[in-house]
Image (tube, rainbow, N blue to C red):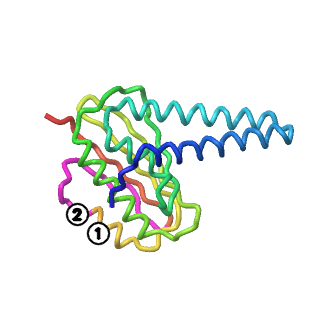
Amino acid sequence: MEKEWGIIEVLKHSRHDWLNKLQLIKGNLDLNRIERAKEVIHEIIMEAQQETKLTNLNTSKLTALLLSANWDKHMFQLEFDVLHECGALNFDDEMLADWTEGLFACLDQSIEPFQENHLSISIEKCDDGARFFFDFRGIIINKELIEGFLANDKKKNFVMVQRELSEQELALEIFVPISG
């Protein structure tokens, strides 16, 4: 399930993303859509700031998973938001990254391919740990598979609250305590 990204492959994907963004700006400028070009630049700045906040969490495995998720062939588009400048988090990074990777695989098998499927992850640091909010919007065709994945307590040392599971939405809140 896990993919190791080599430096050349990372640079290739990163360069491709940047070329797409530059072409979007250039296209809008060529069409004299200055305001839209400015909006795209603002979106790029916001995305870069979120990537910086994510890398500052000092959760290398989870960070690598989230930063490279849209390069994998998932059936959804991932967005993430670190809610505050929160610095390093001290918890079992590998456990949460492995669980999140499992969630991605479960979603890929449970949702309608080639639809507007979006997963948003928000991260908020607390005094005694961190909260992760997973919000999926799209077309879920196999709720039972998701329910089975969420019911599996194997290797989980966090508290999960399922907020919603329907044909169009999955909402979870996970609290991960600080490691001792």
Relative to 76, is 86 on the left or the right?
left
In this figure, which residue is indicated by the disc labeled 1? 148
Depth check, front residue: 67 or 162: 67
Q: Residue at x 58, y 61 (%)?
A: 116
The location of residue 96, given as percent across then percent down, is 28, 48
Rendered-image quadrant of the N terminus: bottom left
Relative to 136, is 96 on the left or the right?
left
Depth check, front residue: 31 or 9: 9
The location of residue 45, given as percent across then percent down, is 59, 31
Quarter of the figure with residue 108: bottom left
**Circle 2 — which element?**
loop
In this figure, which residue is indicated by the disc labeled 2? 152
Q: Is residue 47 magenta?
A: no
Does 37 appear above or below 117? above
Does 176 appear above or below 100? above
Looking at the picture, which amino acid does disc 1 mark?
A: Gly
The location of residue 137, given as percent across then percent down, is 51, 58
Furthest residue toward left = 180
**Circle 1 — which element?**
helix
Report crowding for label 1: few under 14, some 14 to 19, many 20 or more residues within 10 A (C-alpha).
Answer: few
Contact (Cβ within 8 Å) of mark 2 with mark 1:
yes
Looking at the picture, which amino acid does disc 2 mark?
A: Asn
Q: Is residue 163 magenta?
A: yes
Give the residues drawn in magenta, as a range: 151-167
Q: Residue at x 76, y 39 (%)?
A: 26
Rendered-image quadrant of the C terminus: top left
